[in-house]
């Protein structure tokens, strides 16, 4: 069967990455978490105090940012590396969630990341999750899913995820972070979070992970 591109876009904490990872494993496809790439850039900018308003500084910083993924057999998932350092845990922390949307809204940052993502999916056989995969990165993706979920459920899921990683934060802080990120991500000029006109909707509010995976696999079967 010929390989295709599967784009999973949508809001934070709708289960995109977990679904994408499992679909990729079932199909023996590669999985690319584009959010991890923007998070790694945000971490670099934070550590090096890069001024987001200074285009020259942003361009210089981007030249110094090298993001790679390596499979971690213990987690059965890929870890994100920034210039050779495993930053998988660090980029998931709240202080990165608090700044990532400002960094990812910079057009130069987006151009650099989109170019890398297009390279990663050039040979197809990839499941990529993000905000603009079906609209900008791969507008010709064979399967495009747009994932949504009730904001309260998303916040609960995020809280659980952060707790498992050792960060116990008040639900109000998480709700606020998701709200601000949604707003910035949806309203930026370049690659805003937007449903592709030909995307299929998937509301994950009351769906189990097995159901989400089955739904995506069903869409794959339809095009093959
Ligand atoms: O998917 P995740 O929540 O980890 O993404 C973190 C942030 O990265 C998003 O809130 C958004 O600002 C940015 N992002 C983006 N475009 C993508 C993926 C993520 O702007 N394709």
Image: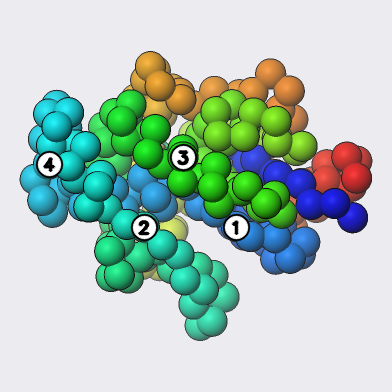
Disc 4 target residue: 50
- Which labelled disc corresponds to residue 31? 1
Question: In this view of the protein, which residue sits in the foreground, 34 or 217?
Answer: 34
Q: Position of residue 197 (x, y in %)?
A: 69, 18
Q: Nearer the viewer, mark 2 or mark 3?
A: 3
Q: Which mark is residue 175?
A: none
- Which quadrant is home to the C terminus? top right
Whichever of labels 2 and 4 marks the residue nearer the N terminus, that label is 4
Looking at the image, residue 157 lies above or below residue 60: below
Q: Position of residue 11 (x, y in %)?
A: 51, 35
**Which callout, 1 or 3, points at the residue further toward the start of the chain?**
1
Residue 64 in the image: x percent, y percent?
Answer: 22, 52
Secondary-structure class at tag 1: strand
> Split into 4 quadrants, where in the image is the N terminus?
bottom right
In front: mark 1 or mark 3? 3
Task: Report the front residue among 73 and 162.
Answer: 73
Side of 89 where 209 appears, left or right:
right
Instruction: Name which of mark 4 and mark 3 comes first in the sequence.
Output: 4
Between residues 14 and 188, which one lies in front from this camera angle?
188
């Amino acid at each position: 069967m010929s390989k295709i591109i599967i784009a999973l876009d949508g809001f934070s904490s709708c289960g995109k990455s977990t679904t994408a990872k499992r679909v990729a494993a079932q199909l023996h496809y590669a999985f690319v978490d584009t959010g991890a790439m923007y998070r790694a850039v945000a971490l670099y900018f934070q550590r090096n105090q890069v001024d987001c308003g200074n285009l020259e500084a942003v361009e210089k910083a981007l030249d110094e940012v090298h993001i790679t993924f390596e499979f971690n057999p213990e987690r059965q998932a890929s870890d994100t590396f920034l210039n050779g350092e495993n930053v998988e845990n660090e980029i998931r922390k709240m202080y990165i969630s608090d700044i990532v949307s400002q960094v990812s809204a910079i057009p130069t940052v987006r151009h650099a990341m989109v170019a890398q993502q297009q390279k990663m999916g050039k040979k197809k056989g990839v499941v990529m999750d993000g905000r603009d995969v079906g609209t900008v990165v791969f507008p010709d993706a064979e399967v495009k899913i747009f994932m949504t979920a009730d904001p309260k459920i998303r916040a609960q899921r995020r809280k659980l995820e952060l707790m498992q990683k050792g960060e116990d934060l008040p639900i109000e802080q998480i709700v606020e972070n998701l709200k601000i990120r949604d707003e910035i991500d949806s309203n930026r000029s370049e690659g805003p979070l937007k449903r592709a006109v030909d995307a299929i909707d998937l509301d994950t509010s009351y769906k189990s992970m097995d159901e989400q995976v089955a739904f995506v696999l069903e869409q794959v079967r339809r095009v093959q």
